[in-house]
Image (cartoon, rainbow, N blue to C red):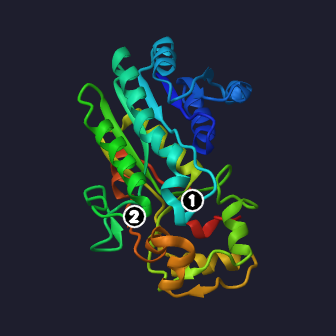
Amino acid sequence: MMRVFVAGATGAIGQQLVPRLVAAGHEVHGMTRSEAKHAMLHELGAVPVVADALDRDRVAEAVGRAQPEVIVHELTAIGEPDMRHFDRAFAHTNRLRTEGTDHLLSAGRAVGVRRFVAQSVTMPYARTGGPVKTEEDPLDPSPAREMRRSVAAIRHLEEAVLGADWTEGIVLRYGGFYGPGTSMAPGEQMPELIRKRKFPLVGDGGGVWSFVHVADAAEATVAAIERGRRGVYNVVDDDPAPVAEWLPTMAQALGARRPVHVPRLLGRLFAGEAGVVMMTELRGASNAKAKRELGWRPAHPSWRQGLFA
C-alpha cells in the first residue's frame, strides 16, 4: 500500500483512477481546485484536498500535509476545442503543464516522493517517417504556428519530470480519450459535430490518430504507479487509424451522413494550420512498451468497439 497524491482527481481520468487506486489498497489524497467537488472526492474514496495548482504555496502545503510516496499529475483545463486558435484554447492547460508541473515537483522534492507520474499526450510526435511512433521517436521540432506554445508546454513537462534525478519520473503519453466524462462521450461536443456534419474530412485525411478508453488509461496509470520505471510510455489502444478511416466509421455509427470533404486550402481557412496538420499529418503511437513493461492490456483494444457506444 502506498500513499498517492492525485492532482486533477476530479477530471475525466481522475474519476476513473482514484477508485481503482483505492480498490488496490492505496491511500489516495485527491486534489481539486473546486470546493464544490469536495463531496465527489469523498465518494470516490479519496481524502479531499482543495488547492489551486497554480498557487505554489497552497500546493506545497497540500503535499506537505499528505506526505505522499507518489504524486500523479493529471491536471488539465481543456474546454471548447478551437483549432484555429489552438494555443489560446489550451492556454490554461499550458500553464498547468509548466507552472503546475514545477509546483508539484518542488513540493514532491520537499517531502521526498519516490515516484512522480505525469500526463502527456501522443499528439506532438514528429510528422516524418512512418505513421506509428514509439517512445524513442522525437517530438515535432517545428509544430504548426498555432500549436507552438502548447507543444512547448508539453516539452517542459516531460523534460522537467524525466530530468528530476531525485525521484523516478514517469511520463504517460495518452492517446485521445473517449468514454465517460470525455468530449467523445455520447451527446458531447465531438459526436454532435460529427452528427451535424460540422467535422469535415480535410485533404486526404492521412493524419493518424491513436485513441484510448479513459478506463483503460486509468488502468495503465495504476500499473505505472505500482511498477513503472523512469521514462515514457505511450498509453493508447491497439488500433491507430487515419482520419479518412475513423471519421466516416464514427459518422456511420452515429447514424449520420458521411462527413463533408474539403481540400487542404479550404480546411486551413476554417481550421487553421493546426487543424490541417491534425487531419493530414498527425502520427499515431505504439503501445508495445506499455504492454511489455507494465503488463497492461487495454480492455477496449480498438475504438471501433465502442467509441460512441
Residue 164 spot, x, y in % from top left:
27, 31
Residue that appears at 74% across and 25% down:
39
User: Left of 219 or right of it: where is 107?
Assistant: left
Residue type beneath disc 2: Arg
Tag 1 residue: 300
Residue that appears at 51% across and 88% down:
263
Res 205 seen here:
yes
Residue that appears at 73% across and 68% down:
192
Residue 306 spot, x, y in % from top left:
65, 64
**Disc 1 and disc 2: Cα gap in Å?**
34 Å
How many labels sit on residues? Answer: 2
User: Left of 206 or right of it: where is 170?
Assistant: left
Residue that appears at 43% across and 41% down:
97
Query: Looking at the figure, which quarter contains the C terminus?
Result: bottom right
Query: In terms of depth relative to the viewer, which is nearer, 294 or 135?
Result: 135
Tag 2 residue: 145
Q: Secondary structure at mark 1?
A: loop
- Rendered image quadrant of residue 251: bottom right
